Amino acid sequence: MKALNVVTLILVIVGAVNWGLVGLFQFDLVAALFGGQQAGLARVVYALVGVAGVFQIGMLVRALSGGTGDSQLTASIHR
């Protein structure tokens, strides 16, 4: 679960940086790297960032509700 959390967090950061560049400089880094907004690979990256964001919302809700997050789960395993 920790690896999935790290991967999704990286994707969310990529999305945030990309939106920051779009907002500040009107430059879409994902589109520039992968051949435009309509390119298949760019669309895959956009979709993965979106799914990662939804996953991270779930992680946030779990953390705020006092649910077992990754760090708490890891700590209980090593006791």
Image (cartoon, rainbow, N blue to C red):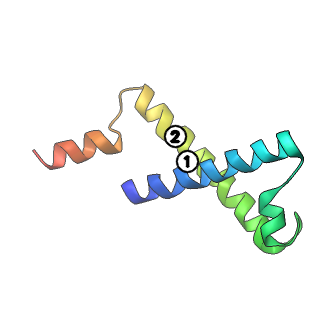
For the point 62% across and 46% down, the residue is 53
Front residue of this view, candidates 76 and 42: 42
Q: How crowded is mark 1: few (under 14 residues within 10 Å), some or many (20 or more)?
A: some
Up the image or down, 31 lies above or below 50; here it is below
| Residue 72 disc label | none
In this view, the residue farthest toward the front is 25
- 75 relative position to 55: left or right: left
- The picture places residue 57, in percent across and down from the top left corner, at 56, 39
Residue 3 visible to the viewer? yes
Give residue 45's quadrant in the image. Answer: bottom right
Three-letter code, disc 2: Gly
Q: Residues within 10 Å of mark 2 (few under 14, many from 20)?
A: few
Dot 1 lies on which element?
helix
For the point 66% across and 60% down, the residue is 48
For the point 77% across and 61% down, the residue is 30
Q: Mark 1 points at which residue?
A: 55
Dot 2 lies on which element?
helix
- 3 relative position to 28: left or right: left
Three-letter code, disc 1: Phe
Front residue of this view, candidates 4 and 15: 15
Q: Mark 2 points at which residue?
A: 58
Up the image or down, 41 lies above or below 22; here it is below
Placement of the N terminus among the 4 image quadrants: bottom left
- The picture places residue 74, in percent across and down from the top left corner, at 24, 47
- The picture places residue 72, in percent across and down from the top left corner, at 27, 39
Q: Are marks 1 and 2 in contact (CB under 8 Å)?
A: yes
- The picture places residue 35, in percent across and down from the top left corner, at 85, 72
Give residue 65's quadrant in the image. Answer: top left
Front residue of this view, candidates 73 and 23: 23
For the point 72% across and 59% down, the residue is 47
